[in-house]
Image (cartoon, rainbow, N blue to C red):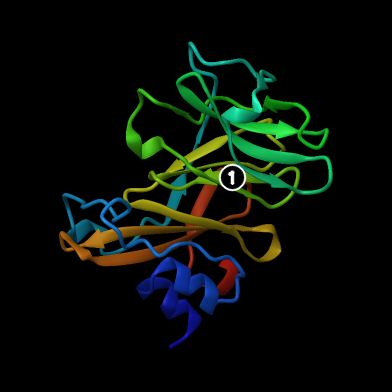
Amino acid sequence: MSCNSKLLTHPVALVLAACGLGTVVPAVSSAATRPRRLATSAAMQAPPATIAARLLTRQRGTVRLGTVVKSGDLGQRVFINGRVGFALASVGEAQYPARTTDAGAVWKTFGPALHVNAAQAPLSVSQIGVENARTIYFYGSGQVVDATGDGGTHWWQALTEGLSAAVTPGFGGRLLWFTQTTVGGNDANAVTWVYSSTDGGKAWHHTTALGGGA
């Protein structure tokens, strides 16, 4: 079986390993993370060719850019060198991207709220990934990927109709987004679709090519 065919039929964790992408993510199989059932299965036999993201802006009642975040309000932290790191911060009733430039002494928000607790659960995120100081992304537990390709000047939120299972760097500076959805109204029939972005998450294009290449 080719790697391309694996992308369409195998659990995400196995696909990543088989394709040599070097990232291990949990297989999506439990009831808590099972792909959501879609009302219209016939229309979902073919994946959308493109998923366009929306630009995230600051919502009323959320904190301002540059707000200092307590260390105890930070989740997973990823450092790209000895001084610069990124994390998902929970401040008040929302989650924000946070950044440090002094080895973790001070953390500040560097983008708008990614998810407000009162909002719909599909917009929630729990995992962080970092390609470099400009390309940072959040995903997991919901149906979105929130990404920036310019160091946080702009944040883009893309929504899938299934589960946002994983995001990982691909070839040539691409980001790969692994989504899972059910077919035929049967939760056991989970199909993995892979999308590639070359613009920091502004637009995602369906791909079957290894690493998201053309």
Toward the viewer: 10 or 28? 28
Residue located 69% across and 58% down the image: 173
Q: Quadrant of residue 156?
A: top right
Q: In this picture, is 4 found above or below 82?
A: below
Residue located 54% across and 19% down the image: 58
Residue located 40% across and 63% down the image: 193
Q: Residues within 10 Å of mark 1 (few under 14, many from 20)?
A: many
- Residue 29 location in percent, x, y? 31, 63
For residue 129, side relative to residue 179 (left or right): right
Toward the viewer: 50 or 61? 61
State which quarter of the image contains the N terminus. Answer: bottom left
- Residue 54 location in percent, x, y? 49, 34
Helix or strand or loop: what does disc 1 sit on?
strand
Q: Which residue is mark 1?
A: 137
Toward the viewer: 10 or 2? 10
Q: Is residue 148 visible?
A: yes
